[in-house]
Amino acid sequence: MRVLFLGENRSRFSSVCLEALLVSGCGHMTVGIGGWTFQAWWRRVARGLRQRGVWRELIAAAGRAWHQGAAFCGQFNGRGPGMLSLYRLLAEHEGTPHYRVRAVNAPEHLARLRALAPDVIFTAGFTQILGPAVIQLPPLGCINLHPSLLPGYRGLRPLRRVLENREKVTGVSLHYVDSGIDTGDLIAQEIVPIEPGDDERCLFARCAPVAARLMVTTARRLAEGERLPRRPQGEQVATAL
């Protein structure tokens, strides 16, 4: 089975899920790595300004900058909330082909995807939105990992938002990618409890092994030719940002 994994260089969930797939040996892996671009940065800031207002978005932007800086330092000292960067992780697994994804829906990237001919595309922590041409390309579909109990808390920073809203539980969802943002049919979900005093770091540490297990289990089922379940998401409890 030919597997394409799309993630962000300094995403915690990208790092955890990619490492699990590499160790599992579920198929022939290729990795596409997204990263910072001015266009993506501006879209995120503009969306935050519309949703939260200037002051709250400035606070959120400062928090993102701190996490990115800590993740960058963590590449060298083994600490920080960002885990290993994908480039460093791939250096530890020599021989895995990888490339930079600047625009996932651009014609040149679509040509690369057709040449790779992946059977399935997995995404985790990947911030670019897949267009119809990408979604329809792999015969086994595009599958995304999202750290919430969908349809609740779609979109960005779900761990932060469940803590802000004082939820008692959250979870991890694996779903097919469709034209929406985290709206595709569900494949698997697992509940993760939120403990008193949890911050994002604690909650990530509890969600990470669940995310890795769900992704590897799903990859193995596909490699064995199993047909995956599909359960439409209900809209009555959907939340998004």
Image (spheres, rainbow, N blue to C red):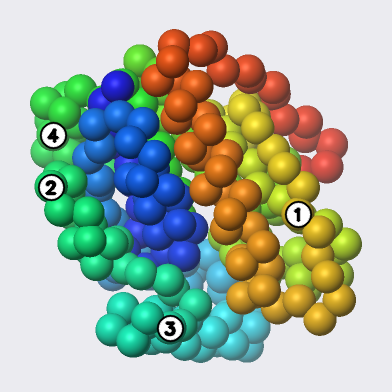
Image quarter for residue 233? top right
Q: Earlier in the sequence, mark 1 or mark 2?
A: 2
Distance from disc 2 to disc 4, alpha carbons, whole Å, reads 19 Å
Tag shown at residue 192: 1
SS at mark 1 in the image: strand
Residue count near mark 3 (Cα–Cα under 10 Å), binned few <14, some 14–19, many ≥20: some
Identify residue type, mark 3: Arg
Question: Which residue is under mark 2?
Answer: 95
Identify residue type, mark 2: Gly
SS at mark 4 in the image: helix
Position of residue 11 in the picture relative to residue 54 (left or right): left
Q: Nearer the viewer, residue 58 or 35?
A: 35
Distance from disc 3 to disc 1, alpha carbons, whole Å, reads 24 Å
Residue 142 x/y as whole percent: 42, 30
If the image is split into quadrants, where does the N terminus sit? top left
Distance from disc 3 to disc 2, alpha carbons, whole Å, reads 26 Å
Distance from disc 4 to disc 3, alpha carbons, whole Å, reads 35 Å
Residue 155 x/y as whole percent: 59, 53
Distance from disc 1 to disc 2, alpha carbons, whole Å, reads 35 Å
Tag shown at residue 112: 4
Residue 95 x/y as whole percent: 13, 47
Q: Earlier in the sequence, mark 2 or mark 4?
A: 2
Q: Nearer the viewer, residue 127 or 119?
A: 119
Identify residue type, mark 4: Arg
Position of residue 184 in the picture relative to residue 110 (left or right): right
Q: Are marks 3 and 2 in contact (CB under 8 Å)?
A: no
